[in-house]
Amino acid sequence: MYYSYVMGIDDSILELKKYGFVIENDNENYTISFPKDKAMLWEEFIVNKLELGYWNEYLADDKVVFLFQLEEGIERYEVFDFKNDEVLALCEKLCECKMESLEKMLSENWYYKKVMADRIKSTNQTYWNEHADLWFGTTALPTLGVLFPTEEELHLFGDVTGKRMLEICCGSGHSLKYNADRGATELWGIDISQKQLENASAYLNENGYSANLICSPMEADMDIPKEYFDIVYSIYGVGWTTDLQGTFDKIASYLKKDGIFIFSWHHTLNYCVGWSCDERKDVLESDGSLIFHKSYFDESYFNMPVHDSKIVLCNRKISTYINALANAGFVIEQMIEQTDDATMAAEGNITDKEKKAKMVPISFCIKARKL
């Protein structure tokens, strides 16, 4: 389906319903969705409704189509990856305002924001359902990150005997087993991938354990008890969220007072410095130096090819995580952004990733307490 949001139009738009358009009223505006084969019908309709100096856009499968009514007539643009300086300049000129980006402009509309988030979740869910077996047991406790100190060294979880624990993005269940081995009495896990949960259930059963496993995006409302858990954690999982603040708010609601939230993820610098997204690998200069290829402040979503598919990620600033935690009612007890001792001591014939990790952290981890 394609999607558009229309303001300042009369109810003649409702006539499109007979052609298979789904049209909902939003105060005096309209949300529109229609099949791909009705795109030309939509364009023919909307260009006749556009007044001079106005535009409409609609979200297609892999692009955004912009239609501008200018003095010289209709100008049509197809924008990929939300990047087109000419379109951005036109939007700024017509609305007489400054815009950070086309993606930011669209995401400030609740309807487009939901559509975009749903598409990102669908893309990532498809990837994990199709490739879960390739990641079986990887990046799981005691591992906290890439070339990063382990839980055996940091002791962030402490004694989990008798604890109720919930894992966000539990994957193949290896971290759940790790905590069960150490005496946790009640295990819960959520993951967007049904295949991941099937692997987790089988793995836990083989080892004599069970868990309450829920297939759902972490952003969704779920049947999870409130103010119930001693520890909620996510090992390289929470960064997949399309709604960081909403996710942290939900996690806070699951925890008891003084409950602990621990999560790890890619350090922001990892995807900014010495990294090729297209090749999905670390890139060092001939002299071993690192160059910024992406702005630290750029939190827009980007596609990354992985295996025969792709994933969609957002490279958030560290302050974005910290502020979202504070807004959700957490106080940070520890933040770790370092490289493990073995990598720091390594010399000679080492990989580009190891060379990079000796200069910038690849991962970070935060331990926070609910107030």
Image (spheres, helix red, strand yellow):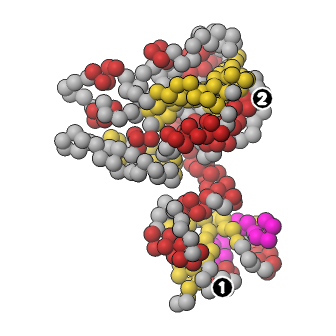
| 106, 130: nearer the viewer | 106
Residue positioned 50% across, 34% down in the render: 265
Comes first in the chain, label 2 or label 1: 1
Q: Quadrant of residue 18?
A: bottom right
Give the x, y percent position of residue 162.
Answer: 69, 10
The residue identified by callout 1 is 51
Q: Name above or below for residue 328 compared with residue 370.
A: below
- Stretch in magenta: 24-44
Residue 240 appears in the figure: no
Depth order, front residue of 253/129: 253
Does residue 290 appear in this view? yes
- Name the residue that disc number 2 marks: 226
In x, y percent, where is residue 155?
51, 15
Q: Secondary structure at mark 2?
A: loop
Query: Mark 2 belongs to which amino acid?
Result: Lys
Residue 343: where, in percent of width, then height?
Answer: 31, 24
Residue 32 within the magenta-colored segment of the rendering = yes
Q: Does the magenta segment cover residue 74?
A: no
Marks 2 & 1, CB-CB < 8 Å contact: no
| Quadrant of image for the C terminus | top right
* Residue 32 at x, y percent in the picture: 72, 67
Crowd tier of the residue under label 1, counting other residues whose Cα lies within 10 Å: few below 14, some 14–19, many 20 or above: few
- Which image quadrant: the N terminus? bottom right
- For badge 1, the amino acid type reads Glu
